[in-house]
Image (spheres, rainbow, N blue to C red):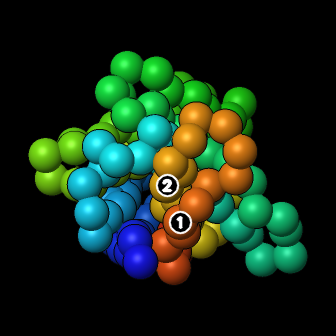
Amino acid sequence: QVQLAESGGGLVQAGGSLRLSCAASESTFSFSRMGWFRQAPGKEREFVAGIRRSGEITLYSDSVKGRFTISRDNAKNTVYLQMNSLKPEDTAVYLCAAGRNIIGPYNYWGQGTQVTVSS
């Protein structure tokens, strides 16, 4: 069973930065796409960013475009989410996901890491 472990969350002031990491238990090259999602209390889970196997194709939600950057290091089996200019509305549990196929639901999910942005 594939395991994804997120790390790097924490408490930061508005305008600050955090870098999240997602370490996979098998080669990330085996996943056609990987992504980051987030879920705030009382809200539905929402897509944040995604990246294809090669790393050349990325996708962002409008709410984070220009502030967040997703990247992957297949040699380290790790996906990153660099978050800059954080806002209080970015507060959520951030989850990593991996998909075998380019389309359809993601196959594997991590447990999540809490990000809290204070105003």
Work out which residue is located at the far left of the displayed protein and give it. Answer: 75
- The quadrant holding residue 38 is bottom right
* Image height of 66 relative to 110, above or below: above
Label 1 element class: strand
* Image position of 114 (left or right of 26): right
Q: Can the viewer see residue 5? A: yes
Q: Residue at x 41, y 46 (%)?
A: 31
- Number of marks present in the image shown: 2
Q: Earlier in the sequence, mark 2 or mark 1?
A: 2
According to the image, label 1 marks what residue? 108
Q: Are there few (<14), some (14-19), or many (20+) residues within 10 Å of tag 2?
A: many
Label 2 element class: strand
- The quadrant holding residue 59 is top right
Q: Residue at x 58, y 35 (%)?
A: 102
Q: Quadrant of the N terminus?
A: bottom left
According to the image, label 2 marks what residue? 98
Between 85 and 27, the residue placed more toward the observer is 27
Work out which residue is located at the far top of the displayed protein and give it. Answer: 56
The amino acid at mark 2 is Ala
User: Are dots 2 and 1 in contact, CB under 8 Å?
Assistant: yes
Q: Are there few (<14), some (14-19), or many (20+) residues within 10 Å of tag 1?
A: some
Q: Quadrant of the C terminus?
A: bottom right
Between 88 and 46, the residue placed more toward the observer is 46
* Image height of 111 relative to 58, above or below: below
* Image position of 99 (left or right of 9): right
The amino acid at mark 1 is Tyr
Between 55 and 6, the residue placed more toward the observer is 55
Q: Can the viewer see residue 116? A: no
- Residue 72: x %, y % from top left: 30, 41
- Residue 86: x %, y % from top left: 52, 49
- Residue 61: x %, y % from top left: 68, 35
